[in-house]
Every structure is written in structure tokens, then in C-alpha cells.
């Protein structure tokens, strides 16, 4: 028996000796397979970001030679009325569109998760609008918002209510686009639904045994468990709405009277209409800082209301 053990020991030692080599080999293969994604990130994301920062310090226009002007573009932004207008319009849109989309998506997810028949069908129906191409969606909503023959005004006339000019009026243009944005609640709804299906059923049973009603189940079980999902949809929604562009470009061209001059659309006009690439790069970096600060504030604030299964906040 001792001979067998002695003979087996070198084999085990050799196996243990090969493990670091195997680990290094796996690491090399892992880096190799990840290299396309790493190179793509460096070349197509980090590279252009660095280039745009240096361009923001120049007065470069398309067809011209960049000239270094330091922070003059950033100073000019503080005196640009259209910059402040676009920032205000985008902030207004974000503050209204994000909570509305979260509310609608959450309510619909609760209804779909309530055990309806044909749950998969309803989930698909509610998600389909998010798959409609941006241009097709914009064309559809242009017809819906048409003051003369659009769907909304036709319904309002049929029930004897006053009509609206929708996107063709300065006072109702942004609210109309907020209504339009709610149509695409499918992404948030699917994520909410996935979160709801992960809530432990035994907790609902425990609330029932304690005499709790449907509101108690929602207040003490569903809502706390869903706070991480709500937080995720909130962060992605804020980032997405600060980059809204298609509606202004296709439907309103920033009008009427700059009422829908969203930030990204203003950046686009500066870069590709006025050919002021240096100024547009400064606009892009200001937006990056704004979104970064807002995201950091959201993460900081999340510690007080986002809960995980361990009972800790993050």
C-alpha cells in the first residue's frame, strides 16, 4: 500500500504542477477571444471620444484647418441661447417622459403577470411597438397628430371635445412627443415582467397567512423586490431621453419656434448643417458630463431606496 501511495504522489504533483500552465493558457485564449470586442471599444469608442475632446478645443469647420482656441467653445456655450433652450427642452422631456414610461410599463407588467390567459400573446403585443423602425414610427405619429385628419383629433371631435394642434403648436409640441414616447414602453415592461417573475411566491403566501391583502403584498413584497429593476429602467431611461433625436429630426425639425430643439438635434445641426465640428464636439462633451453627473447622483440616491434580497442597500 505504501508503494502505491509513493508511486501516485509524483503523478499528483505533476498534475498540480501543470495547473498554473493550464490557467495561463486559458487566460491567453480568453484575451484572444475578447480581443475583437476590446479593439472595437478602443478604436470605435475611446478613440473617437479622445479625438472629439481635442476637436472641442479647436475652431475646426468642415473643409478647414483646425486651430487651437482652448476653452473658447465652452465659454461660448454659456452665452448661446439655443444651447440653454435645447438643454431646457431636453430636461423637460426627460422629467416627464421617463416617469410616465416607468409607470405605464410597470402597471402593464403587473397586469400581464397577474395570470391572464394567453400571457405570451399579450407580452408580444405590448412589445411590438418597440420593434417598429424609427422612421416608420415617426410617419405613423405624424398622421396621428395631424390637426385636420389625424386619429387623435378625429376621436376628440367624435366625442365633442376640443381638438389640439399637437406637434404643430409651440405649447403642445413637447407634451405630444411625451405621449408618443409612452407608446414604446415595451422594453421597460419586459424587464419589469422578468423581475416580477423572480419574486419568491412563498413571501406572498406568508403575507396572506398574516391576513394581508393585495395592497400589503404589493407594498411589502412586490415593490421592495422590484426596486433594483425600477432603478435600472430609471437610469437607462434618463440616458436614453437625453439622447432623443429622431422625433425632432423627422417630425418637427426642432420647431415650432425651437419648441422641440432637443440637445442632440442642436448638436447635429451645429455639426452637419453649420459644419462647426469644434463647437459640436464641445456640445457632446458637455452632454457627456451632464449625463455622467446625473447618473452618479442617481446611484448615490439609490442607497436610500433600492433594496436587495439580503436586505442591504447599495
Image: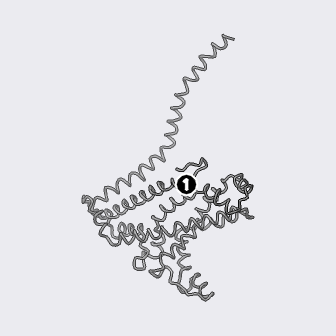
Count of marks, rendered view: 1
Q: Quadrant of the N terminus?
A: top right
Residue under label 1, please give it.
306
Which residue occupies the foreground of this view, 7 or 61?
7
State the image coordinates of residue 81 (x, y, percent, origin top left). 33, 72
State the image coordinates of residue 292 (x, y, percent, origin top left). 42, 57
State the image coordinates of residue 229 (x, y, percent, origin top left). 58, 56
Q: Is residue 242 above or below residue 210?
A: below
Quarter holding residue 7: top right
Quarter holding residue 199: bottom right
Check the image and name the residue furthest to the front: 210
Which residue occupies the foreground of this view, 29 or 245?
245
Q: Residues within 10 Å of mark 1 (few under 14, many from 20)?
A: many
Q: Is residue 91 left or right of residue 71?
A: right
Which residue is found at the position 41% from the left and 57% from the top? 293
Which residue is found at the position 38% from the left and 51% from the top? 47
Quarter holding residue 232: bottom right
Q: Is residue 148 above or below residue 283?
A: below
Q: Is residue 60 left or right of residue 235?
A: left
Which residue occupies the foreground of this view, 5 or 90?
90
Secondary element at image label 1: loop
State the image coordinates of residue 265 (x, y, percent, origin top left). 41, 69
Which residue is found at the position 50% from the left and 32% from the top? 24
Which residue is found at the position 54% from the left and 30% from the top? 22
Give the colour scheme of this rendering: one colour
Amino acid at each position: 500500500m505504501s508503494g502505491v501511495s509513493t508511486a501516485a504522489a509524483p503523478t499528483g504533483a505533476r498534475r498540480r504542477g501543470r495547473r498554473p500552465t493550464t490557467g495561463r493558457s486559458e487566460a491567453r485564449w480568453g484575451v484572444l477571444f475578447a480581443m475583437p470586442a476590446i479593439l472595437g471599444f478602443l478604436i470605435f469608442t475611446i478613440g473617437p471620444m479622445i479625438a472629439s475632446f481635442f476637436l472641442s478645443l479647436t475652431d475646426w469647420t468642415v473643409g478647414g484647418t483646425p486651430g487651437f482656441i482652448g476653452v473658447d467653445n465652452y465659454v461660448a456655450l454659456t452665452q448661446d441661447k439655443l444651447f440653454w433652450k435645447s438643454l431646457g427642452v431636453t430636461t423637460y422631456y426627460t422629467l416627464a417622459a421617463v416617469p410616465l414610461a416607468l409607470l405605464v410599463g410597470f402597471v402593464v407588467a403587473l397586469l400581464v403577470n397577474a395570470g391572464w390567459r394567453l400571457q405570451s400573446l399579450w407580452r408580444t403585443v405590448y412589445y411590438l411597438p418597440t420593434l417598429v423602425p424609427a422612421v416608420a414610427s415617426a410617419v405613423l405619429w405624424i398622421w396621428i397628430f395631424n390637426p385636420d385628419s389625424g386619429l387623435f383629433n378625429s376621436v376628440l371631435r367624435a366625442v365633442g371635445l376640443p381638438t389640439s394642434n399637437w406637434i404643430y403648436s409651440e405649447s403642445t409640441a413637447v407634451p405630444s412627443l411625451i405621449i408618443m414616447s409612452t407608446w414604446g414602453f415595451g422594453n421597460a415592461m419586459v424587464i419589469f415582467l422578468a423581475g416580477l417573475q423572480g419574486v419568491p411566491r412563498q413571501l406572498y403566501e406568508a403575507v396572506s397567512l398574516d391576513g394581508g391583502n393585495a395592497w400589503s403584498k404589493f407594498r411589502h413584497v412586490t415593490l421592495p423586490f422590484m426596486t433594483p429593476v425600477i432603478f435600472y429602467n430609471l437610469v437607462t431611461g434618463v440616458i436614453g431621453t437625453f439622447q432623443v433625436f429622431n422625433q425632432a429630426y423627422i417630425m418637427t425639425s426642432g420647431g415650432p419656434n425651437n419648441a422641440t430643439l432637443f440637445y442632440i438635434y442642436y448638436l447635429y445641426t451645429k455639426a452637419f448643417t453649420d459644419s462647426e465640428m469644434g463647437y459640436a464636439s464641445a456640445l457632446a462633451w458637455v452632454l457627456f458630463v451632464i449625463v455622467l453627473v446625473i447618473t452618479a447622483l442617481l446611484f448615490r440616491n439609490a442607497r436610500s431606496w433600492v433594496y436587495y434580497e439580503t436586505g442591504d442597500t447599495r
